[in-house]
Image (spheres, grey):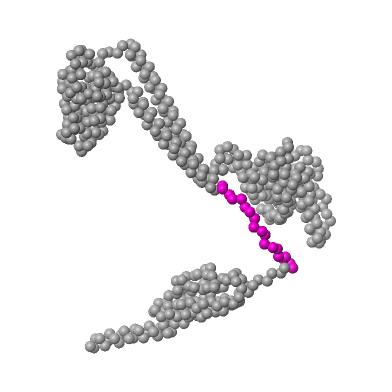
Amino acid sequence: MKNLSHLFFVVLIFLSGSALAQLGAEVTTAVDSTQVKIGEQINLTLQVKTDSLSMVEFSPEPLFLPFEIIEESPIDTLRAQQHYLYTKRYALIQFDSGAYWIPPQKIVVDGFSKFSDSIEIEVATVKVDTIQQPLFDIKPIQTVERSYNQLIKNILLLFVFCLLLAILFVLNRQYKKKKAALLEEIPPFDRAIQELKALENELPKGQQEYKQYYSKLTDVVRRYLEEEADIDALESTSDELLDKLELRKDAGTLDLSLETLNNLKKVLQNADLVKFARSAPAIGIATTDRTIVEQVVIETKEALPAPTEEELAATAAFQRELERKRRKQKIQLIGISVLGLLVSVAVIAIAIYGFNPVKDTIFRYPTKVLLDGSWVRSQYGTPPIQIETPKVLVRDVTATSPVTIYAAGDPFKDVYTQLFFEKRTPAEKKEKTEEEQEQEARAIMDSAVARYEAMGATNLLVQNDTFSSVDGTQAFQLFGSMDLSQEDENIRCRFVSVIFPFEATTVELKIIYPKDDRYGLLIEEKILASLEIIKEL
């Protein structure tokens, strides 16, 4: 009883301590601002102050509706004198104006629930000045043509893959047929020896394997005797075959020794026992029988009459024809292997880079060749303009002062690039009003459009923007589309002009290419990214 009293006292002290610790835990709630605008981030901080023995758990799935959580930080633990501070931070957001309350959050301290304070947040709308910035109606829904490019690409890849499998399957069948045909064209004696040598590597173990082994073995000797000795051996039983061999021996047309005939008889009897009586020969018998059959084949070859001159000539011609077919087969195999390799490389390249880039690389698409070729970085004119282009820009000798032109390419075939320099009399330096600056800019851009019209451009759709070169020089930028004519053929082109209105010279970079060209935009971006004004030489 005394021990139980002590135990009860210890448990009571422990529970009391836990309750006191829980009661002593403090939860603090703070936000960085209670008045925000729509879409502005709200930073909420929850902090629990308790002793070092307490277990603090924040809600794993906090609910802040109608606010959305955009970021949540891990718990930060800090020791302050005799207490610990557990801090959790949340980034909240709201996209509707009005007054909202951040709901209290549940925090578990040593198994007891504590709740944070709820805080009211006012979300204000953003005022729009319709005088300085006019409002426009929402644009109507535009009908966009459905794009089947990805679907077509996937179908082509699947088609190429299936075609490759079909080609490999057909080639494999043809190879097996040709291999079988070549084996048939090998002289009977050579083919029989090859098949017997192949049986040396077979080591039968079970009865089924012995049955297959002896079937191959007897087929070799029967086929050879039928083809070489003109004996009906394939359709004859073992006894009938032996009788026919003895008749040929008595007639003197096939001089086989009595020992050879007896050995062949033993082999045929062993084969019949294995195939029909399901017996298994003793160890080493199968190897001995194969040697006997090989000896029968060799002796039969020696016992046959010597071939005539006509037969020798036919055999030589047969060997030459056989060698020719073997060479042809090797060439076909090499061609098939190369073709399979090329198709495999093409399929892999299409899967990685896409169908059009691979096709355009193989068939030398003009702008693809330009994009992948060696580009030229050089300086032109005064002030010196450094630029990188697919081809070196050549000076136009027909241009007269005060105009200097460097150009390369053909807008009807690939990409036309031009650097235009026009000297002008420097204007008197004075402070220009904003209206005068706008008029000057408009005059410069109108001159650029006039130069396009002088090239024969029609139906121009022009947009303007600002441009900054690599060195930070600001310029005007015109871009859009236009029609160019050549030999009664109209082509829709994209054009880009970057104009630098220096005091003594107007410099214009002009890029023109067919609008539907797949690589024109990539070339344009690469050229513009390299444009630089050389300020110090």
Q: Quadrant of residue 214?
A: top left
Q: What span is colored magenta in the figure?
A: 131-149
x then y, percent, for residue 324: 41, 22
Question: In the depicted view, which residue is nearer to us: 395 or 171?
Answer: 171
In the picture as drawn, the residue positioned furthest to the top comes out as 309
- Quarter occupied by residue 274: top left
Q: Is residue 389 above or below residue 115?
A: above
Give the main secondary structure of the magenta stretch.
loop
**Front-lying residue, 474 or 182:** 182
In the rendered picture of this protein, how many numbered marks are placed on residues? Answer: 0
Q: Position of residue 280 (x, y in %)?
A: 17, 35
* In-image side of 242 versus 104 (left or right): left
> Would residue 80 be visible to someone looking at this image?
no
Name the residue: 18% across, 35% down: 278
The residue at 30%/25% (across/down) is 191
- Quadrant in the picture for the N terminus: bottom left
* 429 relative to 497, above or below: below
What residue appears at the point 32 percent right and 21 percent down from the top-left corner?
Answer: 187
Q: Residue at x 34, y 17 (%)?
A: 315
Q: Position of residue 523 (x, y in %)?
A: 64, 46
Find out whether residue 362 is within the magenta segment.
no
Residue 339, image x, y percentages: 47, 34
Q: Is residue 229 visible?
A: yes
Q: In screen coordinates, is 47 left or right of 129?
A: left
